[in-house]
Image: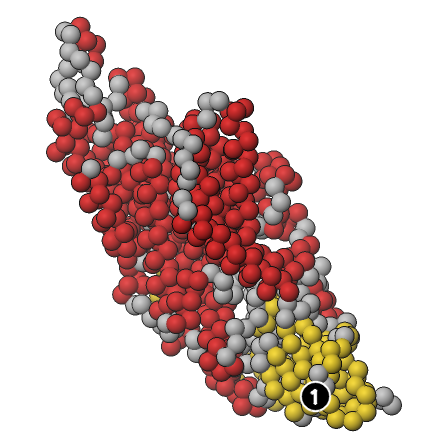
Amino acid sequence: MKHLRLAASWEPLVFLLAAALWLAPVVVHPTGFPFWQGGGYSDLLITHYPNAQFLRRSLLEWGQLPLWNPMILSGAPFAGDPLAGIVYLPNWLAVILPGALGFNLLFALHLAWAGWGMARFLRSEGVGDAACILGGLVFGGAPKLIGHIGLGHLGLVSAVAWTPWLLLATGKAVRADAQIDRRWLARAALAGTILGVVFLADPRWFVPAGLVSLAYGLRRIAHSHPGMPRAARRILLLGLLASGFALGTAASLALPMQEFLQLSTRAHLAVGETTSLSLPVARLLGVLFPDPGGPPEWTAYAGAAAVFLGLVAIAGRAKGSLFWAGLALTSWVLALGDQTPLYAAVRAVIPGVGLLRVPPRFLFLASLGTAALAGAGLDRLLHILDGRQARRARLAVTGLAAVLVLLVAGAKIASGSIPAGWAGSAVLGCAAAALAFLSLRPAGLPAQAPERAASEGARDPSPQDSAASGRPRAQGLAAAWILLAVVDLGWANAGTLDLRPAEAVLTERGDLAEDLAQAWPGDRIFSPSYSVPQQTASTAGLELADGVNPLQLSAFVDYMAAATGFDARAYSVTLPPFPSGDPVADWGAEIDSRQLGLLNIAAVVSDYPLEAAGLTFAGFSSGANIYQNEEVRPRAWVEEVLGGWRPVESIHWSPNRIALRALGPGTLVLSEIVYPGWHARVDGVEVEIQPFEDLLRSVPLPGGEHEVVFLFRPWSAFLGAGVSLGTLLALLVLWARR
């Protein structure tokens, strides 16, 4: 027991060191931004860095927690944007620490959290210390996790890291219920709270995490509740309590996001758009062979050592092996999207699956299942298998090694060359097979077959006997397997990340951004070719009418489609959409300078020449053409009763409050998007906001000078925050009284 406590106390440090190994390029250059080796873009730069920078600026300059974000797409709700990350508290590290440092620390901590959680979970399943460490290393160092770090998917990596902790809490809740333990209410509440935290980190992982938690909980219930009918009421209460705490914890993001989602283009995804990024069937070979330079979304490799140990777990009938094998297999099939009927069935039955859009993200669950199998397999190897189990294990290991060698040989014969990563995987696979054969030699009775031992009256060796007689050998084998897994994952992850200096990526086209900021301070900019990167625009204080975000207001997309000539029928995360996928390819924009002018767009910037009435060529900077919009309107103006308009000169802007003084009579138009939660007061009296051109905010003004204030007070954000806070207090009360 003392040894167990010592091992457990050192586990966090072990996984922190492992995370440093998986993120070796980041450790060497902690201020650089991680990119996928073959990638030109990263969500870390496009979205997360500008959001953190805007949040920091809002707190320091205006003293406000921003609920509205004006930086892209002419403004959108910040509180309802899941990529804003303001309600997932660890993300505030990126606000406190400068540049990439906070983000890199977040990635490292979440990898360590994932590995440690997996180790803790396996220990709760009865797996030994060494096997727990190995399982944690396999999950925390999963190439898919590292690949998504290269894509800049901060929220997704964070959410996935909580999955083993969710399973651990689910198992403890079911166990406490089965034992009629008074703590079962608190444990059920904790499991639900962790699922809610998953939602706060990234709502896209809420459904997969909830599904695996439900499946695991049902498995544990089936094994621990033999009198199921009598326990049905308590089990139902357990599920309802966990669900309630999950929804309550998630409310601070879920309520404003739901409001945003219903008004966005994401709410109208066609069936084909939800599976357009499905895993190609041929990519399932990635389970056995890593694909250096391949798209991280399609990464399926979990390590040769893990796969071989998983086969041993199944052949040795390790506890839960069929469940974890079923999870991995189901995840691989779901990753194929509409190429099998399973995904369509899941999408039809489970709410929210149709909004996920990238089926291969179920491969995270395959990594989880493989890690659990690897831990269980090593645990079986460190104890004596009976003759039948050992023969099955040897056969499975031999078969897989033969498949690896034959596939590599076949590739060599067919194409004359071996694909990158295949040779290394074959070598590691053969090493794993050899180590498995070495591990399958009995530790307690080295020269005596079980049948002979029985005929001579020898007793069957117990696990304690095996541990006592073969401890040095078992420890050596455990160390060898852990070393092989570390080498395997380190090799697979070595070519994934490319660290790029902050001074290079944060100043991409910085001269262009500075020129625009000096020429048109306070006005919006539009580019049909993503000529001003979002991170650069954020640094320069530019507000963009274009942008990249999965949630875009439908009314704004329709308006911009009419003003610039793109097709708004198909879903796109970019505005404007880029039909060829290349932003600098001319897609034939048809600019309506008046419509853009109403949005306070003073300049249009393009990597290719544009021709449109109302646009005047104003210069060339950093390889981009700059055009001045002669039809631009100020940020606010008054539409006069007899026609014409006059500008509003006095405006005090902040994210949640815009105050101005305007002279009536007429209609005051504010070049900001209409959205629920915005309220207007004229001389202290609340008035109804009317849409202007079906998009902008306006209020009527009587004659004379008036003070007009626009306030953003979304009920969804405030109610959600109150519900989440109340849920947290309820959890604390339950644990205090347990």
Q: In this figure, which colouring scheme has been used for the structure? A: secondary structure
Q: Mark 1, residues whose alpha carbon is within 10 Å: few (<14), some, or many (≥20)?
A: some
Q: Nearer the viewer, residue 418 or 378?
A: 378
* In-image side of 691 versus 162 (left or right): right
Q: Nearer the viewer, residue 248 or 447?
A: 248
Instruction: Examine the rendering and report whether any part of residue 396 can be seen.
Output: no
Residue 427 vertical position relative to residue 602 in the rendered view, above or below: above
Snapshot quadrant of residue 258: bottom right
Residue 239 vertical position relative to residue 627 in the rendered view, above or below: above
- Name the element at disc 1: strand
Q: Nearer the viewer, residue 591 or 453?
A: 453
Residue occupying image coordinates x 52% and y 81%: 62
Residue occupying image coordinates x 71% and y 78%: 680
Residue 626 vertical position relative to residue 366 in the rendered view, above or below: below
Residue at the limit of the structure toward the right, as seen here: 642
Quadrant of the frame with the C terminus: top left
Task: List x then y, in percent, for residue 94.
Answer: 41, 68
Task: List x then y, in percent, for residue 282.
Answer: 48, 41
Residue occupying image coordinates x 30% and y 62%: 25
Quadrant of the frame with the N terminus: top left
For disc 1, the marked residue is 707
Snapshot quadrant of residue 461: top left
* In-image side of 83 versus 684 (left or right): left
Task: List x then y, in percent, for residue 570.
Answer: 68, 58
Residue occupying image coordinates x 64% and y 88%: 651
Residue at the limit of the structure toward the top, as seen here: 455
Amino acid type shown at disc 1: Glu
Residue at the limit of the structure toward the front, as seen here: 737
